[in-house]
């Protein structure tokens, strides 16, 4: 009997690993199939990539690189709210290394885990607080991505009414915004309302942990509304830079006749769709979503290959991994030379706790 249980215990991790590999391969196959279909249907014109000029590539890349220190500053604000202090230079290194992880691991979640792990290793403690700051950072990014097209919908509703797809999308965003506003207000007023939900979700540990992190995040952020507003403003800045970068690519490739305001609507929603874990890094999903949104927005049907624009933007954005390589080399060299006196003294006076991915209850239980 014991030998059978031992065999099952060994088989379960192997089966789980094999399942993850199969799911990953299926997602990759789906992404490649979507790209292939977009090329076959003329939605992606590979010849249009030759229209990209060096100046357009440099301008687009510069805008994306500017977003790195903005992202680091946003994370620093959230870390200060949860009572964690790290040097801005270190945070900038962690963000750049996280972007490198996004490119290599083909997903933003992997990049968040990497920068959280580096922050935890630098501190040697406060893993739960770092996890809460990462959750808040991710939620603010999503809210900022939805806020810009929501503002577009309210300003240009008369134009959106002419396209049924845009009407449905606009109404959905307004309904989601209203629901989130009411829900956030209630949770900020009475955060303990999530405790019964946590108890019911114990059979699903990951979901229960997410709800617990959400409650802890609310408890901390409600004490610093100005810091929360500042972090949200910085998140808006990164979304605007991304939209402008895509607009620069579109102008260089001479595809379509959409305005900069149209791209402010299409790009944030595309980035939200691109973040869905359907394919690695949203390959194919982002291109298809961007193409459909642009077709809804164009004044007259033109048959333009709008997917080519986002595909080119994806290729240029992979160059943002270069600062990550530099940061990885610099930070590892500094780590080998020993921790700074500040971090060393901090490590002597605090107990170490598990990494952010393993612990989420350190911030309010202390």
Image: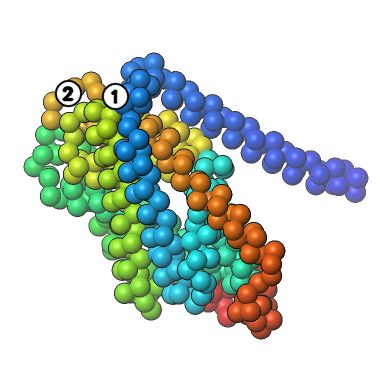
Residue density around tag 2, few if under 14, some if 14–19, many if 20 or more, within 10 Å:
few
Q: Quadrant of the C terminus?
A: bottom right
Compare residues 80 and 169 and report the one nearer the observer: 80
Dots 1 and 2: beta carbons under 8 Å?
no
Compare residues 360 and 68 and report the one nearer the observer: 68
The residue singled out by tag 2 in the image is 301
The residue singled out by tag 1 in the image is 305
Give the structural element (helix, strand or loop) at label 2: loop
**x and y, in percent, of residue 198 in the image:** 52, 63
Residue shown at 37%/54% (left/top)? 66
Q: Can I make out residue 214 in this image? A: no
Residue shown at 45%/37% (left/top)? 282
Q: Quadrant of residue 351?
A: bottom right
Q: Quadrant of residue 53?
A: top left
Using residue 220 as the reference point, say whether residue 330 is left or right of it. Answer: right
Position above or below: 141 against 265: below
Residue shown at 30%/57% (left/top)? 236
């Amino acid at each position: 009997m014991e030998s059978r249980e031992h065999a099952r215990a060994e088989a379960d991790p192997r089966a789980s690993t094999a399942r993850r590999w199969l799911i990953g391969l299926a997602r990759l196959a789906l992404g490649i199939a979507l790209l292939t279909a977009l090329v076959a249907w003329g939605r992606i014109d590979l010849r249009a990539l030759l229209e990209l000029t060096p100046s357009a590539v440099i301008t687009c890349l510069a805008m994306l690189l500017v977003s790195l220190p903005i992202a680091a500053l946003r994370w620093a604000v959230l870390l200060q709210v949860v009572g964690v202090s790290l040097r801005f230079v270190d945070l900038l290194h962690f963000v750049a290394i996280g972007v490198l992880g996004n490119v290599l691991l083909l997903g933003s979640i992997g990049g968040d885990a990497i920068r959280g792990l580096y922050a935890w290793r630098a501190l040697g403690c406060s893993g739960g607080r770092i996890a809460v700051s990462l959750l808040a950072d991710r939620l603010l990014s999503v809210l900022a991505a939805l806020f810009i097209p929501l503002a577009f919908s309210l300003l240009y509703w008369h134009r959106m009414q002419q396209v049924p797809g845009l009407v449905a999308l606009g109404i959905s965003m307004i309904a989601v915004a209203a629901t989130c506003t009411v829900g956030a207000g209630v949770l900020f007023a009475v955060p303990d309302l999530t405790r019964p939900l946590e108890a019911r979700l114990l059979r699903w540990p990951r979901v229960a942990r997410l709800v617990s992190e959400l409650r802890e995040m609310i408890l901390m952020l409600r004490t610093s509304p100005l810091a929360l507003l500042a972090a949200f403003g910085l998140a808006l800045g990164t979304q605007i830079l991304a939209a402008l970068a895509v607009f620069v690519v579109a102008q260089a490739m001479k595809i379509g006749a959409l305005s900069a305001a149209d791209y402010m609507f299409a790009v944030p929603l595309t980035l939200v769709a691109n973040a869905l874990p359907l394919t690695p890094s949203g390959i194919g999903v982002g291109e298809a979503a961007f193409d459909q949104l642009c077709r809804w927005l164009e004044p007259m049907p033109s048959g333009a290959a709008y997917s080519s624009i986002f595909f080119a933007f994806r290729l240029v954005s992979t160059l943002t991994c270069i600062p990550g390589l530099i940061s990885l080399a610099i930070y590892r060299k500094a780590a080998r030379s020993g921790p700074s006196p500040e971090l060393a003294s901090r490590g002597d006076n605090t107990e170490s706790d598990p990494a952010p991915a393993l612990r989420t209850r350190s911030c309010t239980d202390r």
